[in-house]
Image: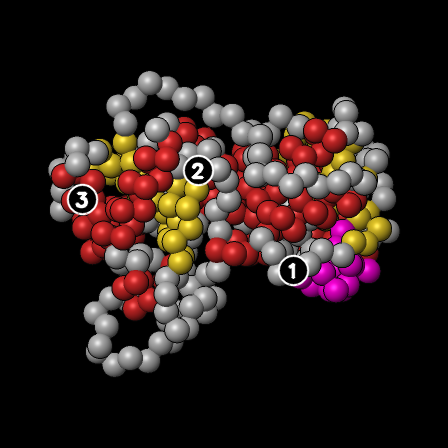
Amino acid sequence: MKVLLIKMSSMGDIIHTLPALTDAGKAIKNISFDWVVEENFQEIPTWHPLVKNVIPIALRRWRKNIFSKKTFSEIKKFKNKLRENQYDLIIDAQGLLKSAIITRFAKGNRAGLNYQSAWEPLASLVYHHKYSVDEHQHAIVRVRKLISQTLHYQMPNTIPDYGLSIPKTNQEPYLVFLHGTTWNTKHWPESYWAALAHLAVSHKMKIKLPWGNQNEKLRAERIASASSHVEVMPSLQLKEMAQVLANAQAVISVDTGLGHLAAALNVPTIALHGPTDPELTGILGARQKNLKVNFPCSPCLARECHYQAGKMHEITPPCFTTLSPELVWAELNNLLTKEV
């Protein structure tokens, strides 16, 4: 059975989709998937053994030069690529108008969320087969339920199996601090990272600090300057970053795609949640722990903090005062102790 899957972005959403493919592979013999995904994330689906072809799309880049000849040429090539195969089923796992429209470029019956369940309800008008999935549950469960319904098998009640295999090497143990994220409100305070690094180093642990842009690099350098045995990583490609995570003793992460990747690689991971709700988008797995702030306005789901408290809080956003470095350190030790 040959299935075309539409799930384009973001990194976390792509990783959330992987366990559904593993479920399908266990339920249906000889099933394989082609996957339409944003070009920046096209490497991730290739790590799952059931993904045979990745079809990159460049919507983010095309929007910036929508009327250029190069954009028109790339869109034409993309459409032609989609129409090379007759699919047994086309699944839109995103539930947006843009993803629903893309299903029409391919050949095969189209399936997706119904009007009540889709993030953008009008997307459901495009599908031949429509399914209901409760929105008040974790994103991983949502996509597992959707794909199990479209392919007519019972979703297993199991811990998510992401199906990833990244080679591990024998290295001296180290921790990875994933301090970078796109929302200002998701940032755990820099002073807290420095304090956590000091605690780890005082217990003879080494730390690696990756970064994705110049601001993150400068933050990593400031955190590293507070303690010895803290390494600021060089600029890394996604596969190189995956190898760093796969070989880590543990990962501490803000709510970001790389944190979900660490969970998918079955690395002991602690995720720090301020404005977001781990019940819906937290990391899931056998060796993961979500820490949620205890604050009146959380989860606010806001990219900018609007909490009005005058000067009573020196920490920004103030909700993170309830997730101190000492608390995170204690939870990390609990997590690592369970692995022994």
Q: Going 75% across and 40% down the picture, which residue do you hit?
A: 154
Mark 2 lies on a secondary structure that is: loop
| Label drawn at residue 287 | 2
Asked whether, in this view, residue 324 is left or right of residue 293, the answer is left
Q: CA distance from mark 1 to mark 2?
A: 25 Å
Q: Type of residue at label 1?
A: Glu
Q: Which residue is mark 3?
A: 199
Q: Which residues are magenta?
A: 112-125
Mark 3 lies on a secondary structure that is: helix
Q: Going 33% across and 36% down the picture, which residue do you hit?
A: 336
Q: Quadrant of residue 210?
A: top left
Q: Type of residue at label 3?
A: Leu
Q: Residues within 10 Å of mark 1 (few under 14, many from 20)?
A: some
Q: CA distance from mark 3 to mark 1?
A: 40 Å
Depicted 155 relative to depicted 274: above or below: above
Mark 1 lies on a secondary structure that is: loop
Q: Earlier in the sequence, mark 1 or mark 2?
A: 1
Q: Nearer the viewer, mark 1 or mark 2?
A: 2
Give 36 or 315, whichever is nearer the viewer: 315
Q: Type of residue at label 2?
A: Arg
Q: Which residue is mark 1?
A: 135
Q: Quadrant of residue 269?
A: top left
Q: Earlier in the sequence, mark 3 or mark 1?
A: 1
Point out residue 257 in the picture as x, y percentages from the top left corner: 46, 46
Residue 129 seen in render: yes
Q: Earlier in the sequence, mark 3 or mark 2?
A: 3
Point out residue 258 in the picture as x, y percentages from the top left corner: 43, 43
Point out residue 142 in the picture as x, y percentages from the top left corner: 65, 51
Q: CA distance from mark 3 to mark 2?
A: 22 Å
